[in-house]
Image (cartoon, helix red, strand yellow):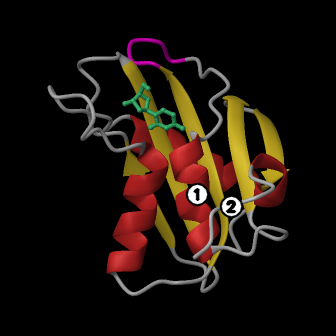
Amino acid sequence: MISQRELLKRAIEARKKAYCPYSGFAVGAALLCNDGSVYTGCNIENASYSPTNCAERTAFFKAVSEGKREFLAIAIAGGRKEAKELEACYPCGVCRQVMSEFCDAEQFEVICGVSEDTLEVFKLKELLPKNFIL
Ligand code: THU
């Protein structure tokens, strides 16, 4: 299985595709499925702002739309578009809720890249102790 560091590298690579002309903040994500496959995503902004999709949700929606339903971890890399250096980028509340729909919150790992070689790892449960359920 791919390491946390390798997964972050995939997120850093995906960040290069970010479409973020309005915020100038580029984010990449790499989502690891339980079968070992990896789906990447970037943020995709819109002139009307609210249709913007975060990198994490892009990765989830790509994977789910390809039939994947079980996930182990997601790595996230964010920072100013022009800067090579990353900034700490924790997932927004909407993305945490999307993660909670498909993941075991006590197992699923959220790997945040603070820099290319500094990771902060959380369990989803820590980031979203109480998700919305129907
Ligand atoms: N963004 C993400 O893609 N993921 C996050 O976890 C936080 C924010 C994006 C949305 C928007 O395009 C830009 O970063 C600034 O908010």
Query: Label 1 sits on what residue type?
Result: Gln
Q: Who's the residue at 16% across and 28% down the image? A: 48
Mark 1 C-beta to ligand 1 under 8 Å:
no
Element assignment for label 1: helix
Q: Residues within 10 Å of mark 2 (few under 14, many from 20)?
A: some
Q: Residues within 10 Å of mark 1 (few under 14, many from 20)?
A: some
Quarter of the rendered structure image containing ligand 1:
top left
**99 vs 58, nearest the viewer:** 99
In x, y percent, where is residue 42? 38, 44
Q: CA distance from mark 1 to mark 2?
A: 6 Å
N-term-proximal mark, 1 vs 2: 1
Q: Who's the residue at 81% across and 59% down the image? A: 125
**45 vs 115, nearest the viewer:** 45
Element assignment for label 2: loop
**Drawn side of residue 89 relative to residue 16, left or right:** right
In x, y percent, where is residue 71? 62, 75
Task: Kindly report the secondary structure that dominates the magenta region of the rendered protein.
Answer: loop
Residue under label 2, please give it: 131
Which residues fall within the magenta stretch?
80-84
Q: Who's the residue at 43% across and 59% down the image? A: 59
In x, y percent, where is residue 102? 58, 75
**92 vs 24, nearest the viewer:** 92
Residue under label 1, please give it: 97
Of the 4 image quadrants, the one containing the N terminus is bottom right
**Drawn side of residue 17 relative to residue 41, left or right:** left
Q: Are the residues tagged 1 and 2 within 8 Å (C-beta)?
A: yes
Q: How many marks?
A: 2
- Does residue 10 appear in the picture of this structure? no
In x, y percent, where is residue 64? 41, 77
Is residue 82 found inside the magenta-colored segment of the image? yes
Query: Label 2 sits on what residue type?
Result: Asn
- Does residue 120 appear in the picture of this structure? yes
